[in-house]
Image: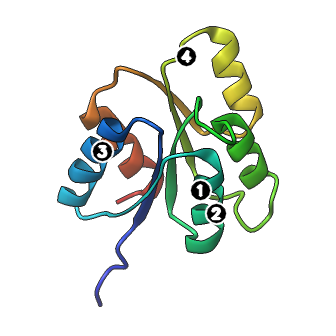
Amino acid sequence: MKMKVKTVLIADDEIDIVETLKFMLESEGFEVLTAYDGEEALKKARTNFPDIILLDVMMPKINGYKVSRLLKFDKKFQDIPILMITARSQEEDKLIGEETGADEYITKPFEISNVIDLINKYLQV
């Protein structure tokens, strides 16, 4: 029986970060969805039910904290792991991330291999 391909939603307003992550994750065998602002991220998460979400905090329209909160407080989406990726590295930012339901908080710059390891850990690939 063939394994279902796992879907990762990457939401970040920095195109180079999205493209780099997309390329690396696709080469690892994941299906990748992308969003460049919070509104688009929310819409794609609700439409496509990704297996995991990589979510930037500072994005246009709706910030990552709010996207995380909206998904985590909705029974249909609360079990989707959210890995926040952000340039904000203050302890208070991490606390807000935890309060809004983020499962991990990754600060930029980050190692792609660490992100892939975390994704595999959450998806138990």
Looking at the picture, how far across and down is residue 79, in whole percent?
A: 66, 58
Nearer the observer, 86 or 6: 86
Question: Mark 4 vs mark 2: which is more N-terminal?
Answer: 2
Nearer the observer, 76 or 16: 16
Q: CA distance from mark 2 to mark 3?
A: 20 Å
| Residue with the mark numbered 2 | 43
Closer to the camera: disc 2 or disc 3?
A: 2
Q: Identify the image quadrant of the N terminus.
A: bottom left
Q: CA distance from mark 4 to mark 2?
A: 24 Å
Q: Identify the image quadrant of the C terminus.
A: bottom left
Badge 1 local density, few (<14 within 10 Å), some, or many (20+)?
some
Closer to the camera: disc 4 or disc 1?
A: 1
Badge 2 local density, few (<14 within 10 Å), some, or many (20+)?
few
Q: Determine whether the residue tagged by mark 1 lies in a helix, strand or loop.
A: helix
Badge 4 local density, few (<14 within 10 Å), some, or many (20+)?
some
Q: Residue at x 31, y 63 (%)?
A: 30
Q: Determine whether the residue tagged by mark 2 lies in a helix, strand or loop.
A: helix
Question: Mark 4 vs mark 3: which is more N-terminal?
Answer: 3
What amino acid is at disc 1?
Glu
Question: Mark 2 vs mark 3: which is more N-terminal?
Answer: 3
Q: Residue at x 56, y 45 (%)?
A: 37
Nearer the observer, 46 or 105: 46
Kindly indicate whether the residue at mark 2 contacts the one at mark 4 (C-beta within 8 angstroms): no
| Residue with the mark numbered 1 | 40
Q: Residue furthest front?
A: 61
| Residue with the mark numbered 3 | 21
Q: Residue at x 29, y 52 (%)?
A: 22
What amino acid is at disc 3?
Leu
| Residue with the mark numbered 4 | 88
Q: CA distance from mark 3 to mark 1?
A: 18 Å
What amino acid is at disc 4?
Arg
